[in-house]
């Protein structure tokens, strides 16, 4: 049995059989375009990377991870977006073993608060920096890395600092690759044909996983199980494609927001990765489903009222983990709290009843609810989860008629930031922006 599966029946009664069949014909026509790597973008190397990653790369990741585990108290991942969210999701889902160093993520924003504690750790603890960026020119991680690197060199000297810096970047081009080669840092490649948000199963995510003590070979094995539909399978019946198809039918009916919900904190990082994966892949040309995330049952006490009785513009995707790997049982003795009916019951069982109770309440209230079920918290399950959603979002973008592998809207923000910060070559844009901002302030 695959480690992850779609509960397609959960979409009833919001999706009719005839709608599914019409959409299935479209999926059958688009599926070969993706699998045969003939999409409008060449950025589809993630589709088979778990099979084509070489032993040199995989063994190198494992060897360097072991060195980090011996030498470091703190391992910093310096990156933003696709350079950090996938690794963070893996660590929250799978955890780290007792021998692993503390793993921190920095370079995700420009707040000085985020860097103060990190810089102090560099001064006082044994640290290794893993700077992750395809180009090396993304502002947030570049600024954080510059500060961390300078502090590290002051603390341990330039020679030892070089041994404690690892760059994960483009194979041959870009500022970070040039620095890595000039300084002699250990480095790993981000494949040219894999975009950031699809890079979880490359050294971008594999190195932090291995440092945490996660068996990355098992992660890749789980991904391989979901890389493509088994031979002879109707593409429209394969779970990742079917999920993409069902959510697209809901989109055409006006459901423009998808609320991804986990019932365990272990899935919070997965939710953050999904938010980027779907927003950057689909949100183009005035189209796309807006992804938001929640954690039940916690958020039932905040947004639950709106979901139950608010405007009918969203649908939910429940991420249900069948086995969290731990459990707690209510003591089997009487108490005066009115909850004796739960004596001897486990929290896992109660959580499942909460999931089903929420599912029925929201569906009866007019909210479409789909379920994606994870078997357990194994490395295979995480690898399968990543490949499931990467395949699904690629097809979803194609169903929308957009390129799911670029992010032109992000570049607009970056250009404005460069201009306002005074980057050379952006002077004219900077002057125009300053004038626009001044006019806005005057109108206040």
Image: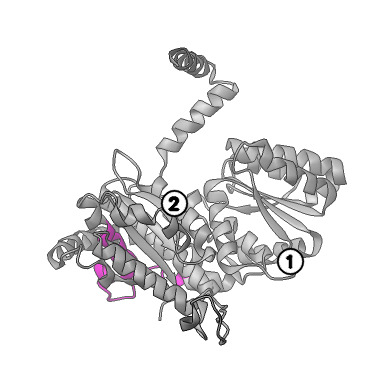
Q: Can you say whether 280 is above or below 206 in the image?
A: above
Nearest the viewer among 361 and 174 is 361
Nearer to the camera, 203 or 240 = 240
Q: Position of residue 82 (x, y in %)?
A: 52, 50
Task: Say whether disc 1 or disc 2 marks the residue closer to the N-terminus.
Answer: 1
Residue tagged by mark 1? 66
Q: Which residues are magenta?
A: 223-247
x and y percentages locating residue 275 in the rendered image: 44, 51
Is residue 315 visible in the rendered image? The answer is: yes
225 drawn magenta: yes
95 and 284: which is toward the camera: 95
**Left or right: residue 59 compared with residue 222:** right
Residue located beneath label 2 in the image: 275
For the question of whether residue 137 can be seen, the reply is: no
| Protein image colouring | one colour
Left or right: 11 as drawn, with respect to 428: left
Q: Residue at x 26, y 47 (%)?
A: 401
Q: Which mark is residue 382?
A: none
In terms of secondary structure, where does tag 2 sit? helix
Looking at the image, residue 231 sits to the left or right of residue 429; the answer is left
Q: Position of residue 322 (x, y in %)?
A: 45, 76
Q: Does the magenta-highlighted stretch encompass residue 261?
A: no
């Amino acid at each position: 049995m695959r480690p992850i599966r779609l509960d397609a029946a959960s979409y009833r009664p919001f999706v009719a059989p005839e709608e599914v069949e019409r959409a299935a014909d479209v999926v059958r026509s688009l599926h070969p375009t993706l699998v045969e790597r003939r999409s409008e973008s060449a950025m589809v190397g993630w589709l088979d990377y778990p099979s084509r990653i070489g032993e040199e790369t995989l063994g190198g990741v494992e060897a360097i991870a072991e060195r980090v585990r011996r030498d470091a108290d703190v391992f910093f991942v310096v990156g933003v977006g696709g350079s950090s969210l996938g690794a963070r999701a893996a660590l929250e889902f799978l955890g780290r073993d007792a021998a692993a160093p503390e793993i921190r993520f920095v370079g995700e924003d420009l707040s000085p608060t985020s860097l103060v504690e990190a810089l102090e750790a560099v001064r006082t603890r044994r640290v290794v920096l893993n700077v992750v960026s395809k180009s090396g020119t993304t502002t947030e991680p570049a600024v954080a890395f510059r500060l961390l690197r300078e502090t590290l060199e002051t603390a341990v000297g330039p020679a030892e600092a070089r041994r404690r810096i690892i760059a994960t970047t483009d194979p041959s081009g870009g500022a970070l690759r040039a620095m890595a080669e000039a300084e002699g840092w250990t480095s790993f490649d981000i494949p040219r044909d894999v975009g950031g948000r699809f890079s979880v199963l490359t050294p971008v995510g594999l190195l932090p996983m291995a440092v945490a003590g996660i068996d990355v070979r098992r992660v890749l094995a789980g991904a391989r199980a979901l890389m493509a539909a088994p031979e002879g399978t109707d593409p429209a019946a394969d779970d990742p494609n079917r999920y993409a198809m069902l959510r697209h039918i809901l989109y055409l009916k006006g459901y423009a927001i998808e609320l991804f919900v986990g019932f365990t904190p272990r899935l919070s990082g997965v939710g953050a990765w999904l938010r980027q994966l779907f927003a950057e892949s689909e949100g183009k040309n005035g189209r796309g489903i807006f992804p938001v995330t929640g954690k039940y049952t916690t958020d039932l006490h905040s947004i639950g009222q709106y979901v139950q009785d608010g405007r009918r513009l969203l649908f939910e995707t429940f991420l249900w983990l069948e086995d969290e790997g731990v459990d707690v049982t209510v003591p089997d003795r009487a108490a005066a709290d009115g909850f004796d009916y739960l004596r001897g019951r486990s929290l896992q069982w109660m959580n499942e009843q909460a999931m089903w109770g929420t599912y029925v309440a929201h569906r009866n209230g007019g909210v479409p609810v789909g379920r994606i079920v994870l078997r357990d918290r194994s490395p295979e399950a995480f690898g399968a989860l990543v490949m499931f959603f990467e395949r699904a979002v690629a097809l979803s973008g194609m169903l929308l008629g957009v390129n799911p592998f670029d992010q032109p809207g992000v570049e607009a923000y970056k250009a404005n930031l460069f201009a306002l910060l005074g980057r050379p070559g952006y002077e004219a844009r900077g002057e125009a922006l300053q004038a626009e901002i001044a006019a806005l302030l005057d109108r206040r």
